[in-house]
Structures are given as C-alpha cells and as structure tokens.
Amino acid sequence: MGEGAILLVEDNPDDLELTRRAFRKVELRNEVRVARDGQEALDALFGPDRANEPPALVLLDLNLPRVSGLEVLRRIRADERTRILPVVILTSSREERDLVEGYRLGANSYVWKPVVFDNFVDAIRQLGLYWLLLNERPPVEP
C-alpha cells in the first residue's frame, strides 16, 4: 500500500498471526514491526534501538502485558517526537470505558477486531487504504 512501516502492538500469538494473514491477503507491502507487549512498543518508539524513522501507523491492542495499551498511548501523546503519530486502537475490547479513554488520550481511531476472518480482512484492508494511502502524513521532523 503506502510508504512507511506499521508498528503492530499485539501480545496474543493467534491474533498476531491472524493480522499477518490479513496483511498478506490484502497485499499490504509495508514493513510490519511487531511489539509483543507495551514495553516492547515503547522501546521500538523511544529506545536506543528504535528505527530512524517513526512508523507510519501504530496498530495498538489495549490488553497488553507489562505496560497497558492505554499507557503506551499516553506516552506516545506525551512525547513531542510521536505526538502526532497516527495510532489506531485495534482491540477485542468492547468496553465503553476503553473506547472513551482511548479517544480521551488521543487515539485517532478505535476499531473492534471482527471475529470472522473475512470481516477482519476487510477491516485491515480499509485501515490500510485510509491510513497508508489516503491520509496525508505530516513530514518527519529531524
């Protein structure tokens, strides 16, 4: 699809594989970096081994070990380097408090993971089309 990497923050191995399969099915060619818990996500974004260029998009699960998805989002929005980074919460949580808190903390979108694979593939296709092709990203600051 578009340029730039995707940071996929997902701890569930089954959901991770499902998402990767969906990426292949929609022919998403972007590099996918995986963080398996909240601390790995923070390290990927802020740690000494982070990529030179921030990802084009963060797909963030909420229920993560070590550091919660909402705390990851809070830290993303608190740092000048990542404040405007697009973050889509991609979660199985249907809790209204998670939805409200996600938006309050600055999520760009909140998407519930469909259970049926074909519906999940369609959701991934639409996310990719919008965030990686249609959406205009701000320039990366040095």
Image (tube, rainbow, N blue to C red):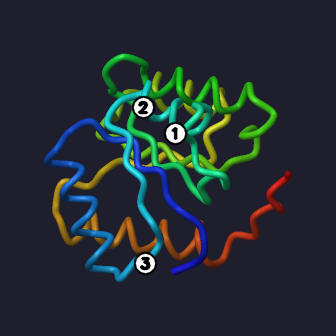
Residue 64, above or below 88: above
Quarter of the rendering containing residue 12: top left
Q: Residues within 10 Å of mark 3 (few under 14, many from 20)?
A: few
**Could you say whether the residue bearing mark 3 is in a helix, strand or loop?**
loop
Label 3, label 1: how far apart the Cα atoms are: 20 Å
- Going from N to C along the chain, the mark reached first, 2 or 3, is 3
Residue contact at pointers 3 and 1, CB within 8 angstroms = no
Label 1, label 2: how far apart the Cα atoms are: 6 Å
Q: Looking at the picture, tell me which residue is in the foreground, 94 or 139.
A: 139
Residue type, mark 1 in image: Ala
Percent position (x, y) of residue 102? 55, 31
Percent position (x, y) of residue 56? 61, 60
Residue contact at pointers 1 and 2, CB within 8 angstroms = yes
**Could you say whether the residue bearing mark 2 is in a helix, strand or loop?**
helix
**Could you say whether the residue bearing mark 1 is in a helix, strand or loop?**
helix
Q: Residue at x 81, y 61 (%)?
A: 138
Label 2, label 3: how far apart the Cα atoms are: 23 Å
Quarter of the rendering containing residue 133: bottom right
Side (left or right) of 132 relative to 124: right
Q: Residue at x 45, y 66 (%)?
A: 31
Q: Looking at the picture, tell me which residue is in the foreground, 142 or 126.
A: 142
Q: Residue at x 85, y 52 (%)?
A: 141
**Label 1, on which residue?**
44
The total of numbered circles placed on residues is 3
- Going from N to C along the chain, the mark reached first, 3 or 1, is 3
Percent position (x, y) of residue 18? 20, 59
**Label 2, on which residue?**
40
Residue type, mark 3 in image: Arg
**Label 3, on which residue?**
29
